[in-house]
Image (cartoon, rainbow, N blue to C red):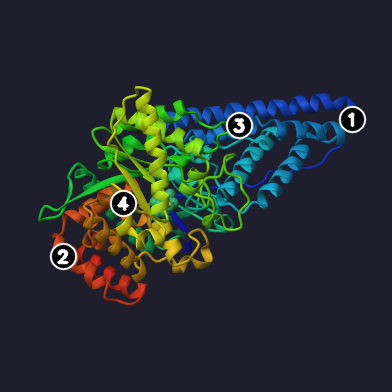
């Protein structure tokens, strides 16, 4: 059994297909001056062929997922392929050093890799792997290697690979590729995002799974627990077959009730919303029973763009969001660029502690032109449905006032232009910095709603980097400090009569569901796949049961004790989920 990171839940049992996408071996040849032109043409042909292959992948992706957003990942690869620096540098090396195109390209790729290696930011590191994927594709076409398309299998396979490009993942027809496991990868990589969108069980970050597996080996992927079992014994095989059967049964049963409200036995109703990054996720979100969007991460709109989106671009997207999610509401979070987040041409400052740096609302308040443009677009789109505005990383009342001051100016501007919009659009604050939580009573007087962002609130209150595997053991949602911050925030909101939700990952974790309900949260917003389970849990209890559980949980002194208690309670009440 090998432990990795489960990025897409479920169990798949089948035969391995070892996809050797490791680097093409490149040799160096000197060429005569008369061969330079034909070598360049060979290079250009390989580029063209790679381009055609990527366009095909994109078409399939759109067909499979009805997708616009995720196919932008392939657009990025096409953009890299067309990058003038990459092409011109390779041609220059062929001409000046009189070497074969493979060698020239390898040299450029190595140079790019070095530049990207010096960048700390995890998002930019992902871009380095995008460049490498594209480079490998061109190299394969140059050396004439047959590319194994992942939609060509005639029987079910589990892909085992060093790494997969999002383009690879996109080709995985649901019926044939039934799971995958890779050496590399992280929760936030595009490949993981696509796997979740396709609902294929997947485990990544296994370090060297490729060296243990041969094509044809029996293998089990447990994407829920993040483990891969190689050559299972008949006993283990039966155990996982049963686990798989249970998983499928539970999902099937849950999906029958997605249209039911998240209401306790004694009729206490909670709003269940979804977090999204791309608009094409909306049909999936609705099929899972969401009653709106609790977090639209608009920074993904800036992902991989060379050009800044215009006001019209923003408006079109927000209008579509408002219309498609109607009659439900959608919460648009203003840009959360910076920190561990999406970097782009927009945000290239060199900061020692980017997570504590010019990020989110701080960034918007510094770049008022961008902030105004986004607010104008949201307001105009508010005429087409129910929209809400939410500010990320508010640290105290002053920032909220500054942001609201700009919003008021933008509203005036639109009124004077005669533009119609929702003048009472709700404006909320993300509670994800301890200082915001501790001053929640003050913030609640000037906000229409709160949404607790536990991903960051845990990071900042326990002082652990949310993306550093060395301190991952300290990342404890049930830490007494966090429970107190949540409780205080909820009480502060309710004292001022405003609703409070949660859009951090904790909101979709079945283990925490009753604690959060008991602490008084009004709205849960989560990854759409988690919605049916959370609804089911809420529908099975009386409100007072959850309140008792939450208060008992708060009597323990360590996160481990809280967790052991909650796990004991939840697994006996809901054995199907634990
Ligand atoms: C959070 O911090 O909990 C959150 C929802 O925002 P993000 O994960 O986008 O930082
Ligand atoms: Mg956050």
Task: Single out the mark in the foreground, 4 or 1.
Answer: 4
| Rendering coords of residue 458 (x, y %) | 41, 62
Which labelled disc corresponds to residue 32? 1
Q: CA distance from mark 1 to mark 2?
A: 82 Å
Q: Which callout, 4 or 2, points at the residue further toward the start of the chain?
A: 4
> Which residue is the site of mark 3?
79
- Mark 4 Cβ and ligand 1 under 8 Å apart: no
Residue 358 versus residue 547 in the image, above or below: above
> Which residue is the site of mark 4?
450
Q: Residue at x 51, y 46 (%)?
A: 363
In the picture, measured across the screen, residue 242 lies left or right of residue 101, that is left
Q: CA distance from mark 3 to mark 2?
A: 55 Å
| Rendering coords of residue 406 (x, y %) | 42, 39
Q: Residues within 10 Å of mark 3 (few under 14, many from 20)?
A: some
Q: CA distance from mark 4 to mark 1?
A: 69 Å
Q: Residue furthest right?
A: 33
Evaluate whether residue 508 shows in this view. no
Q: Which callout, 3 or 2, points at the residue further toward the start of the chain?
A: 3
> Which residue is the site of mark 2?
545
Evaluate whether residue 387 shows in this view. yes
Task: Single out the mark in the foreground, 3 or 4.
Answer: 4
Residue 85 versus residue 459 in the image, above or below: above
Q: Which callout, 3 or 4, points at the residue further toward the start of the chain?
A: 3
Query: What is the quadrant of residue 75 in the picture?
Result: top right
């Amino acid at each position: 059994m090998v432990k990795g990171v489960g990025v897409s839940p479920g169990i798949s049992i089948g035969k391995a297909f070892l996809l050797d996408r490791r680097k093409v071996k490149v040799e160096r040849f000197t060429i005569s001056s008369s061969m330079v032109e034909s070598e360049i043409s060979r290079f250009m042909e390989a580029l063209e062929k790679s381009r055609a292959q990527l366009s095909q992948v994109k078409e399939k992706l759109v067909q499979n997922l009805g997708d616009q957003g995720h196919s932008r990942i392939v657009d990025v690869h096409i953009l890299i392929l067309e990058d003038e620096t990459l092409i011109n540098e390779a041609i220059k090396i062929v001409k000046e050093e009189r070497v074969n195109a493979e060698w020239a390209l390898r040299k450029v790729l190595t140079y790019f890799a070095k530049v990207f290696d010096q960048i700390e930011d995890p998002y930019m590191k992902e871009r380095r792997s995008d460049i490498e994927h594209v480079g490998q594709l061109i190299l394969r076409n140059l050396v004439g290697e047959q590319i194994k398309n992942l939609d060509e299998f005639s029987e079910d396979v589990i892909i085992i690979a060093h790494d997969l490009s999002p383009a690879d993942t996109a080709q995985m027809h649901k019926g044939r590729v039934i799971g995958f496991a890779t050496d590399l990868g992280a929760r936030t990589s595009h490949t993981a995002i696509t796997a979740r969108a396709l609902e294929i069980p997947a485990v990544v970050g296994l370090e060297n799974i490729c060296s243990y597996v041969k094509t044809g080996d029996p293998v089990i992927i447990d994407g829920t627990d993040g483990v891969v079992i190689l050559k299972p014994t008949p006993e283990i095989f039966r155990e996982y077959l049963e686990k798989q059967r249970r998983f499928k049964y539970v999902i099937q049963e849950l999906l029958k009730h997605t249209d039911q409200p998240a209401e306790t036995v004694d009729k206490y109703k909670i709003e269940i919303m979804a977090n999204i990054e791309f608009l094409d996720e909306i049909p999936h979100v609705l099929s899972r029973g969401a009653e709106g969007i609790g977090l639209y991460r608009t920074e993904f709109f800036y992902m991989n763009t060379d050009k800044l989106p215009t006001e019209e671009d923003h408006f079109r997207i927000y209008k579509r969001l408002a219309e498609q999610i109607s009659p439900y509401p959608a919460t648009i979070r203003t840009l959360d660029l910076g920190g561990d987040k999406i970097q782009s041409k927009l945000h290239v400052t060199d900061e020692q502690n980017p997570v504590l740096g010019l990020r989110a609302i701080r960034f918007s308040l510094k770049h008022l032109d961008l902030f105004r443009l986004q607010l104008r677009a949201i307001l105009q789109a508010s005429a087409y449905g129910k929209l809400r505005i939410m500010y990320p990383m508010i640290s105290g009342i002053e920032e909220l006032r500054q942001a609201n001051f700009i919003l008021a100016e933008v509203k005036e501007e639109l009124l004077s232009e005669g533009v119609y919009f929702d003048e009472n659009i709700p404006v909320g604050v993300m509670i994800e910095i301890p200082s915001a939580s501790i001053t929640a009573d003050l913030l609640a007087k000037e906000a229409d709603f709160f949404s607790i962002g536990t991903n960051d609130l845990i990071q900042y209150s326990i002082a652990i980097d949310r993306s550093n595997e060395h301190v991952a053991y300290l990342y404890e949602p049930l830490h007494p400090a966090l429970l107190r911050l949540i409780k205080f925030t909820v009480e502060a909101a309710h004292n001022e009569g405003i609703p409070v939700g949660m859009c951090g990952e904790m909101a979709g974790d079945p283990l925490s569901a009753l604690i959060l309900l008991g602490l008084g949260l009004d709205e849960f917003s989560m990854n759409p796949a988690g919605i049916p389970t959370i609804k089911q849990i809420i529908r099975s209890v009386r409100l007072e049961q959850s309140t008792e559980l939450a208060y008992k949980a708060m009597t323990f002194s360590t996160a481990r004790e809280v967790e052991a208690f909650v796990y004991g309670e939840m697994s006996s009440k809901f054995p199907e989920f634990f």
